[in-house]
Image: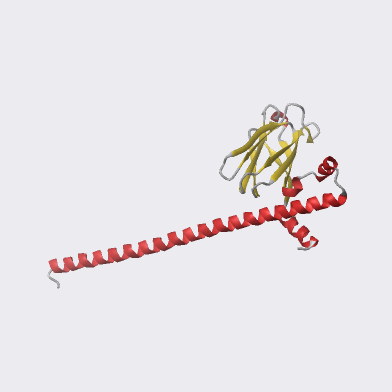
Amino acid sequence: MSLQTILAVSALFTAVSGLYFHIGETEKKCFIEEIPDETMVVGRYKVHIFDKNVNDYVPTVQGLGMHVEIKDHDSKIIMSRTYASEGRFTFTSAMAGEHTICLHSNSSAWFSSGQLRVHLDIQVGEHAVDYQQIQAKDKLSELQLRIRQLLDQVEQITKEQNYQRYREERFRQTSESTNQRVLWWSISQTLILLVTGFWQMRHLKSFFEAKKLV
């Protein structure tokens, strides 16, 4: 596999998502990320509060933070922790599947000034790795660092492919189960119609015999 092919495919299978959203008092915002197993996820966020005096969003004051809760596809809590108004959270997926990332304010005392705007950036896979820090820590050359990046990208591609096969298998099982249920439902309907028709014929025959029409 050529270097260009590896880079092109890795760009498809690795994920980086940045967005911002508004949140009100006691409101919780949740996001779903499909993550392969044993994949590191890094989330960075920054909270601003609406200031009516300047009619714009400004950095929040001390005391206001965000509570981050992460669940796997079985609704098992992987992480639940309160951070400051600007921070970074990290976790590694133990199982492949949909992971739910929820954020909400740790206090409602600050909402008298207005709603919050949260900037959130979620990085999945090798994009979550700080290679500059690794280079400085392990004293790697540019070539060694580039090889390390390529190896991580190939490993991430393998994980994504395994996850896609897992999803395909689950979809196939669901389709087969649905088709089987539809088949049995059709057979049941046919049997009900046959039994009903037989009962109606017997009833009509008894009626005609009682009236001496046959």
Nearer-the-camera pick, 141 or 128? 141
Q: How is the image coloured?
A: secondary structure
Nearer-the-camera pick, 142 or 97? 142
Q: Quadrant location of residue 63?
A: top right
Residue 131: percent from left, percent from top? 81, 45
Total of numbered circles in the picture?
0
Extreme residue in the bottom direction: 214
Q: Is residue 175 left or right of residue 93?
A: left
Q: Quadrant location of residue 26?
A: top right
User: Looking at the image, which residue is at 73% across and 38% down?
Assistant: 117
Which quadrant is home to the C terminus?
A: bottom left
User: Looking at the image, which residue is at 75% across and 45% down?
Assistant: 128
Nearer-the-camera pick, 142 or 8? 142
Q: Quadrant location of residue 41?
A: top right
Residue 76: percent from left, percent from top? 57, 40
Which quadrant is home to the N terminus?
A: bottom right
Extreme residue in the right direction: 141
User: Looking at the image, which residue is at 87% across and 50% down?
Assistant: 142
